[in-house]
Image (cartoon, helix red, strand yellow):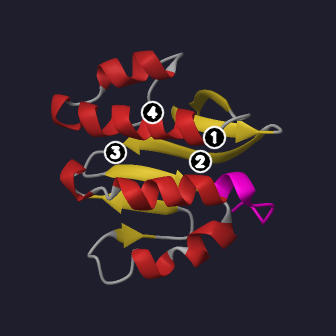
Amino acid sequence: MQSKALTVTEYLLEVPEERKSALKKLRALCRKHLKGFEEGMEYGMPGYKRNGVVEAGFASQKHFIAFYILRTDVMKSHANQLIGTGISHGKGCIRYSKPERIDFKVVESLLKATVQSTGQVC
């Protein structure tokens, strides 16, 4: 959903109850691992910028929770952890059809790799 919320806290108040816990955990992990990144509302969803460039984010969409990792090298290096899991993913987005399908260890690994990456942003 593209939100008109001005802050991530306001955004989290709008999301469906069954997704709140997972989205709050995604936020907590982003804040923990993305040191030096600026948290804000980007494109109607929570985003994390470094040097003015959005590199990560998440959103509650109509049919899934989207987790965005926009460094292409990070997504490529973690593809083996997504392929064969039944988790839909694309160039910079991982789509979780149900909150309980989120593997938070993989999320942490993606975030840590994002911090280290200087690769291209998609």
List x then y, in percent, for residue 95. Answer: 36, 59
- Residue found 25% across the figure and 33% down from its top: 21
List x then y, in percent, for residue 64. Answer: 28, 52
Calculate the distance from the C-alpha at mark 3 to the C-alpha at mark 4. Answer: 19 Å
Report the quarter where the N terminus lies.
top left
- Residue found 23% across the figure and 59% down from its top: 101
Point out the frontmost of discs 2 and 4. 4
Calculate the distance from the C-alpha at mark 3 to the C-alpha at mark 2. Answer: 16 Å
Disc number placed over residue 115 in the picture, else none: none
Disc number placed over residue 28 in the picture, else none: 4
Q: 12 left or right of 31?
A: left
Point out the frontmost of discs 3 and 4. 4
Calculate the distance from the C-alpha at mark 3 to the C-alpha at mark 1. Answer: 23 Å
Q: Which residue is mark 1?
A: 34
Q: Residues within 10 Å of mark 4 (few under 14, many from 20)?
A: few
Q: Is 55 part of what is drawn in magenta?
A: no
Q: Which residue is mark 3?
A: 61
| Contact between labelled residues 1 and 2, with CB atoms less than 8 Å apart | yes
Point out the frontmost of discs 3 and 1. 1
Q: Look at label 4 and name its amino acid.
A: Ala
Task: Please tell me in which quadrant of the rendered image residue 19 appears.
Answer: top left
User: Between disc 3 and disc 2, whose residue precedes?
Assistant: 2
Q: Residues within 10 Å of mark 1 (few under 14, many from 20)?
A: many
Q: Look at label 2 and name its amino acid.
A: Ala
User: Between disc 2 and disc 4, whose residue precedes?
Assistant: 4
Specify start and end residues of the magenta stretch as a single range. Answer: 114-122
Task: Please tell me in which quadrant of the rendered image residue 61 appears.
Answer: top left
User: Between disc 3 and disc 4, whose residue precedes?
Assistant: 4
Q: Secondary structure at mark 1?
A: loop
Q: Secondary structure at mark 4?
A: helix
Q: Is residue 73 above or below residue 20?
A: below
Q: Which residue is mark 2?
A: 56
